[in-house]
Amino acid sequence: MNSRRNFVKKTVIAGAGLSFLPNMSFGSVLGDSKDKLKLAFLGVGLRGCNHLNNALHRKDIEVTAICDIDPERIKIALKMIDDAGYAKPKVFGNSDYDYRNLLELKEVDAVIIATPWLWHTRMAVDSMKAGKYTGVEVSAANTLEECWDLVNTHEETGSHLMILENVNYRRDILAVLNMVKQNVFGETIHFRCGYQHDLRGVLFNDGKTAYGKGVEFGDEGISESKWRTNHNLLRNADVYPTHGIGPIAAMCDINRGNRFLSLTSHATKSRGLHKYIVDNGGENHPNAKLNFKIGDVITSTIETSNGETIIVTHDCSSPRPYSLGFRVQGVEGLWEVDGNRIYVEGKSKPHQWDAADEWLKKYDHPLWQKYGELATGAGHGGMDFFVLNAFVESAKENIAPPMDAYDAAAWSAITPLSELSIENNGEPQDFPDFTRGTWIKRKPYNWIKDTY
């Protein structure tokens, strides 16, 4: 995980501000502390506790309930809440479905779901049916049926769903989004993105240490290896597309005047995870006998109704530095995150890249200009501050969030569609229109503002 942390630090533009102060309360500058949102957490593992930590620094939130089937995680969360000076919340987790008892509580307005992937949709659906404003971690769904479940439940209940994609709030991403909206690159034609991250030390461990040791997973593993690795064993698909596609979808107004039309995917052979097990556990380790289904590198090409193409790459089984591989290209220039470079016709020297830093500073997003000092220490280089703030402020007003149920469905659909395409030798797969035609008239979300 150090590679991710180091990368995020490097992407934060110089002058981002002071380190996060443990005693600083976001609510003192965000919202009315007298009108508190009653918030519950389904899942208080590492990701859930990250959200919990940020929530506890706000004055406009009460944490009224938590749920997790791991007693040790409950203890950790309760200590965090107590150390922050808040009252003890109600606790659930006696069984897999005890969360449904939490959802019956009147003293819960909103719910954040940070559980293993297979629970995301069923919990989000139950939460919306209970009338709760729902935030779900990524990806939001595993199958096309689950994608439709999210959309249908939102439409049937009127309850809002926000997919908690934090990369949409990364500082360089918002600066480039600002450049796109100001037409710096001209009309956009092509994008690249993905999730390129050596996860071998996440997918395997020794059952005692979360990251970087051992080759166990499943029942013998701990933390993410307990559940995440099985997706790689059983599926040949881009199982984690939203960190890349979320920001690109915002730049080209997907579901709001534009939509994904079709997808074609291909996968390389699967070698990296097996090699890691042999190298670190030996040829005779039981896991060395398993055949992991996921290809080491999965490449998907998406076409949009407005004529753009988007290449999405999943590359998590081999040794490599972290990168989401962003490229944003228009008819007058482009930005590439790898190399930290920009070229704008008529402003850059002909056929020469500019270092991106000055451009990113010039178009620094209003949110980062306003809240950069608060955000810097809130997790993942500050992104987590903004995604939680957008959720809380949207929930307090009970209005549609920046990234809604239709986005959750469209972005998550890449997983099952890529699986189908790979199974059929790269056959193109049509994207469902989760908006049922309303994308034509839906107005783009106003991303260029300093509120949330």
Image: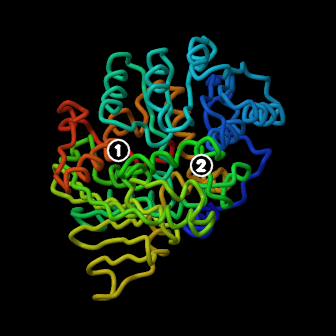
| Of labels 2 and 1, the one closer to you | 2
Residue 168 versus residue 225: which sits nearer the camera?
A: 225
Going by the numbered disc 2, the residue's amino acid type is Phe
Which comes sooner in the sequence, label 2 or label 1?
Answer: 2
Q: Residue at x 37, y 60 (%)?
A: 295
Label number found at residue 411: 1
- Viewer can see residue 12: no
In this rendering, does residue 156 appear at all? Answer: yes
Q: How many marks?
A: 2
28 above or below 168? above
Q: Is residue 147 above or below residue 211?
A: above
Q: Is residue 29 left or right of residue 306?
A: right
- Secondary structure of the residue carrying tag 2 is loop
Q: Position of residue 80 (x, y in %)?
A: 78, 37
Residue at the spot 47% in from the left edge and 24% down from the top edge: 398
CA separation, marks 2 and 1? 27 Å
Residue name at image x 31 percent, y 23 percent: 152
Q: Which mark is residue 217?
A: 2
Q: Residue 32: x and y, percent?
A: 63, 29
Q: Give residue 54's quadrant in the image.
A: top right
Give the residue type that dot 1 points to: Trp
Q: Secondary structure at mark 1?
A: helix
Q: Is residue 253 left or right of residue 114?
A: left
Q: Quadrant of the N terminus?
A: bottom right
